Image (cartoon, rainbow, N blue to C red):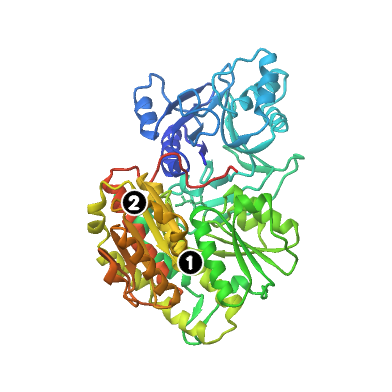
């Protein structure tokens, strides 16, 4: 949450670099934005609203926003509503120190009281504002800027990614505890940001910072030191993403582009991981990981739905497995030993709740494994094993292609851990091979946009599924509510009669996911009949193997495949349902209200 970008380099480029970076980071928060640019003096502008409000303001500015250093920020509010005053950067009373921050200063109230008792006047309601005032106080005491910033940081409790500019110093200073920060190493210019897309059009050479590291960037280069001031040697890595991958490529929204990228993202996820001739799954990253006594998945949101699916898959393969909301697990972890495996599903690799849950598991001796999309993210540095989703950058706040890659990822994992090379693995490999083309067929022929037209005035929507279709029903409802702002609930189909059925009327469209023709599918068809009998309009998302279509007002068809993968195809139809409904309602699809892509607070 919150996007940070900082730049040291060509004075005439600073503002453009910052605004370009913020535009690519807006998925992290978008309720206000601001920049500070300068050299001997810092010019600060900030505005509530999306980035264009700031850009409009800057185009009317009567000072030139030029200078060799600059910081920018796009905010997701935690302390104080989105107003001009609460937007970052925050400064001290003289405007000498400018700070952008992602995270929460947990002891800000005590620090604010202390500073106010010293006569400091605050201009915002944020926790962040204590930081420039603390730094300014150390500067007044005669400390040099770097020491003053280090000293101020020692007073902070909580989480922070901070970038600091000080007027008259042609350098930027940055520090991290918990939220991510990454350096971009250019040719005579340097970047620091919350995420790589902020500077990807300028450089692909990056350095990922770890907790409690401190950075100085100036025209001579970059140095990373620890809390003790000692130099830390860091690797420069080259990211393989291309700048075009972070653009919209002609699509109206990132979400639609990312939905359409799924045939490719799935191929990338599978590349080199299936031995088609041998009919087996080969996941090199898991070499050395034996079959655990039990598996506990921890995750949030969409990733939690992938975790529910993964746990079921492992249980089907004979391994005891459970899925937990990471935030619940973090406060009451299930018992584990060194024989158990805790798996964190997190596309961003930065979700604070999931990181905390994994640390709980590791602290109790369990092995840990991460499935993530972001190379170098915090989860990859903290877990014993990592499987990358290889979905490419996902900038729409609504997770789509990373979810389908998660479902494939847990299939690969389950095959590695449970199948032991048997016949079921051969079936899976053959189904996986056909999956990207089947997704393409859905994208080419989906009736989702036509089907939802008649529901434009409905205000409540239900999503049902059973077995492997249940997590997909939950995910369909989450995606729908996230971007349409309409009330949507996902239920286990069998639970309907235990309460939710009371809500079903002729005004509540029901989307039922029915794949395969096993006991679960047949029972869901029974539930479909129940809602139909209460006059609810029914849309069945089905491969047509069971005869669910017979009881439906509308059918969204998916190709037939292995029972483990059919729910993934059904999910693609539900992504399109949510997208077209939100587009019809003219919602802010890529930046839904109150949400952010990467949730780095607990
Ligand atoms: O990065 P993660 O996968 O850990 O994120 C977890 C959730 O915040 C995320 O899936 C969220 O629910 C999405 N916005 C859903 O589209």
Does residue 330 sit above or below 281 in this rendering? Answer: above
- For marks 1 and 2, the one nearer the N-term is 2
Does residue 276 sit above or below 179 in this rendering? Answer: below
Image quadrant where one finds the C terminus: top right
| Residue 176 percent across, percent down from the top left | 64, 41
| Residue 43 percent across, percent down from the top left | 48, 23
In front: 86, or 390?
86
User: Of circles 1 and 2, which is in front?
Assistant: 1
Q: Quadrant of residue 563?
A: bottom left
Does residue 580 sit above or below 168 in this rendering? Answer: below
Left or right, 591 with reference to 314: left
Left or right, 51 with reference to 139: left
| Residue 172 percent across, percent down from the top left | 59, 34
In front: 591, or 520?
520
Mark 1 vs mark 2, CA separation in Å: 25 Å
Q: Dot 1 surroundings within 10 Å: few (below 14), some, or many (20 or more)? A: many
Q: Does residue 264 appear anywhere in the picture?
A: yes
Q: Dot 2 surroundings within 10 Å: few (below 14), some, or many (20 or more)? A: some
Q: Quadrant of residue 404?
A: bottom left
Report if the beta carbon of the residue with label 1 is closer than 8 angstroms to ligand 1.
no
| Residue 6 percent across, percent down from the top left | 52, 37
In front: 540, or 404?
540
Does the CB distance between marks 1 and 2 fall below 8 Å? no
Q: Secondary structure at mark 1?
A: helix
Residue under pointer 2: 248
Left or right, 90 with reference to 55: right
Q: Quadrant of residue 316?
A: bottom right
Q: Secondary structure at mark 2?
A: loop
Residue under pointer 1: 407
């Amino acid at each position: 949450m919150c996007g940070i970008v900082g730049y040291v380099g060509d004075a005439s480029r600073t503002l453009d670099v910052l605004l370009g970076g913020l535009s690519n980071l807006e998925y992290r928060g978008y309720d206000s934005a601001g920049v500070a640019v300068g050299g001997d003096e810092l010019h600060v502008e900030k505005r509530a609203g999306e980035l264009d409000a700031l850009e409009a303001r800057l185009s009317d500015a009567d000072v030139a926003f030029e200078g060799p250093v600059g910081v920018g920020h796009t905010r997701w509010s935690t302390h104080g509503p989105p107003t001009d005053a609460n937007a970052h950067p925050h400064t001290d009373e003289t405007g000498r120190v400018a700070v952008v921050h992602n995270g929460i200063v947990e002891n800000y109230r005590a620090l604010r009281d202390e500073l106010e008792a010293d006569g400091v006047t605050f201009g915002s309601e944020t926790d962040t504002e204590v930081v420039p005032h603390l730094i300014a106080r150390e500067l007044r005491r005669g400390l040099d800027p770097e020491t003053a910033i280090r000293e101020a940081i020692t007073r902070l409790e909580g989480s922070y990614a901070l970038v600091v500019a000080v007027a008259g110093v042609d350098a930027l200073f940055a520090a991290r505890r918990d939220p991510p920060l990454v350096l971009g190493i250019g040719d005579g210019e340097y970047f620091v940001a919350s995420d790589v897309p902020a500077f990807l059009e300028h450089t692909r050479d990056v350095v990922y910072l770890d907790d409690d590291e401190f950075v100085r960037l100036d025209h001579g280069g970059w140095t990373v030191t620890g809390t003790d001031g000692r130099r830390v040697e860091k690797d420069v890595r080259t990211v393989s993403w291309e700048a075009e991958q972070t653009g919209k490529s002609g699509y109206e929204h990132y979400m639609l582009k990312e939905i359409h990228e799924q045939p490719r993202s799935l191929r990338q996820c599978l590349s080199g991981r299936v031995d088609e001739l041998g009919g087996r799954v080969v996941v090199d990253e898991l070499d050395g990981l034996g079959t655990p006594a039990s598996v506990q998945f921890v995750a949030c949101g969409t990733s939690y739905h992938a975790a529910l699916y993964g746990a079921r898959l492992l249980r089907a393969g004979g391994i005891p497995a459970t899925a937990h909301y990471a935030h619940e697990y973090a406060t009451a972890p299930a018992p584990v030993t060194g024989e158990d495996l805790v798996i964190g599903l997190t596309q961003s690799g930065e979700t604070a709740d999931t990181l905390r849950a994994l640390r709980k598991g590791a602290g109790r001796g369990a092995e840990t494994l991460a499935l993530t999309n972001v190379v170098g993210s915090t989860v990859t540095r903290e877990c014993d094993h990592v499987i990358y989703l290889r979905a490419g950058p996902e900038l729409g706040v609504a997770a789509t292609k990373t979810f389908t890659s998660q479902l494939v990822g847990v299939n690969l994992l389950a095959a590695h851990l449970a199948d032991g090379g048997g016949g079921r693995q051969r079936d899976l490999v053959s189904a996986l091979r056909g999956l990207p083309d089947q997704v393409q067929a859905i994208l080419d022929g989906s009736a989702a946009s036509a089907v939802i037209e008649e529901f434009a005035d409905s205000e409540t929507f239900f999503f049902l599924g059973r077995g492997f279709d249940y997590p997909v029903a939950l995910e369909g409802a989450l995606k729908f509510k996230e971007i349409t702002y309409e009330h949507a609930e996902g239920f286990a189909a069998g639970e309907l009669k235990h309460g939710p059925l009371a809500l079903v009327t002729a005004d509540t469209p029901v989307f039922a996911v029915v794949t395969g023709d096993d006991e679960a599918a047949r029972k869901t068809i029974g539930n479909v009949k129940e809602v139909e009998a209460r006059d609810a309009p029914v849309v069945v998302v089905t491969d047509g193997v069971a005869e669910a279509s017979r009881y439906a007002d509308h059918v969204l068809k998916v190709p037939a495949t292995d029972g483990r993968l059919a729910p993934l195809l059904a999910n693609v139809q539900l992504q399109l349902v949510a997208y077209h409904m939100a587009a019809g309602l003219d919602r802010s699809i890529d930046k839904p209200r109150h949400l952010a892509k990467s949730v780095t607070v607990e």
